[in-house]
Amino acid sequence: MQLRTDLAMEAVKSLKSQIEGVRQVKRTEGALKITQVTIESEAAARRIGKLIGEYITIELPTFTDNCDNAEEKSETIAGQIKNLLPQKGLIFVVGLGNEAITPDALGPKTIKSILATRHISGEIARSAGLDSLRPVAAMAPGVLGQTGIEVSEVILSIIKRITPAALIVIDALASAETSRLGTTIQICNTGISPGAGVGNARPGLNEETMGIPVIGVGVPTVVDAQTLARDLLAEEANDAKHLDEISNKTMPRGERMIVTPREIDLLIERSSKLLAMSINTALQPDFSAKEIMALL
């Protein structure tokens, strides 16, 4: 049974042995645990099922029970995002997902609190004391079922028009462990494959397809039911008979089931606010959190 996870750290852990072409560094900053996984070779990328690049996993107290020191957390997260971005130029921030489906609403919710500044320039910016603002464009393009247009087509057409220096893509992720739901943030420079977490992968958003650096930012909000069942059954799940039983019970009518926390609405609300604050801080280092909030 294939492990379904968007987290590189979990994918590496599932191999249960070190492989050549993968570096992993762990450290702690305050209450946050940071794990940086670097995939350096094509062979390692194939083994792990991820693209070559940097994957930063930040573990923090659960969003649903702990909202203390939000500014301190956002500064740490912002530092990780900033390290992956070009120093100058327009940044295009896109929130993926369907706001009508709570576990998938992270992207659109985050975009509502992103400070868009591309339109603030020239004399208006100078007279308002905002000439040091970095230009930022932001949007939530919806999903294929709502628009009839692939998200990748929408984003690429806008990139060709406004020519940003980089793209930041925010999306809900899938984890292999329920303990990571609402307690983990992944930041990477390999982009995102929309819908991959729920088995509905759309064309990938990465530097190869978009033509510019793509930074993926996400929070796990769901666990695949088959993956969860395998973890709960532990060694029994390695037996072929039990694998068939798991598949039958977790895929009624052949359809995959997804598990999400009961308090998912609170998780999405708080994680989207923290991600937005972190991205704003990374993009506008000359402004304090209070100044950014005032501008919003």
Image (cartoon, rainbow, N blue to C red):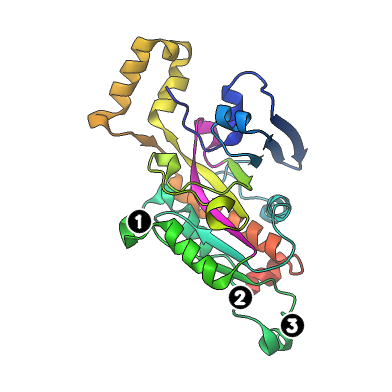
Q: Nearer the viewer, mark 3 or mark 1?
A: 1
209 above or below 40?
below
At label 3, which amino acid type do we have? Gly
Q: Which residue lies most toward the left here? A: 253
Going from N to C along the chain, the mark reached first, 2 or 1, is 2
Q: Residue at x 32, y 27 (%)?
A: 250
Q: Nearer the viewer, mark 3 or mark 2?
A: 2
Disc 3 to disc 1, C-alpha distance: 40 Å
Q: Residue at x 38, y 36 (%)?
A: 258
194 above or below 211?
above
Q: Mark 1 — residue?
A: 144
Q: Quadrant of residue 127?
A: bottom right
Question: Is residue 170 one of those drawn in magenta?
Answer: yes
159 above or below 253?
below
Q: Residue at x 47, y 66 (%)?
A: 157
Residue 242 seen in render: yes
Q: Nearer the viewer, residue 280 or 212?
A: 212
Going from N to C along the chain, the mark reached first, 3 or 2, is 2
Residue 41 left/right relative to 249? right
Q: Mark 2 — residue?
A: 118
Residue 136 left/right relative to 241? right
At label 2, which amino acid type do we have? Arg
Residue 261 seen in render: no
Per the rendered image, the range of residues in magenta is: 165-182
At label 1, which amino acid type do we have? Leu
Question: Is residue 192 one of those drawn in magenta?
Answer: no
The image shows residue 94 at horizontal and vertical percentages of 52, 60
Q: Nearer the viewer, residue 111 or 118?
A: 118
Q: Mark 3 — residue?
A: 129
Disc 3 to disc 2, C-alpha distance: 15 Å
Label 3 Cα crowd, 10 Å radius (few <14 / some 14-19 / many 20+): few
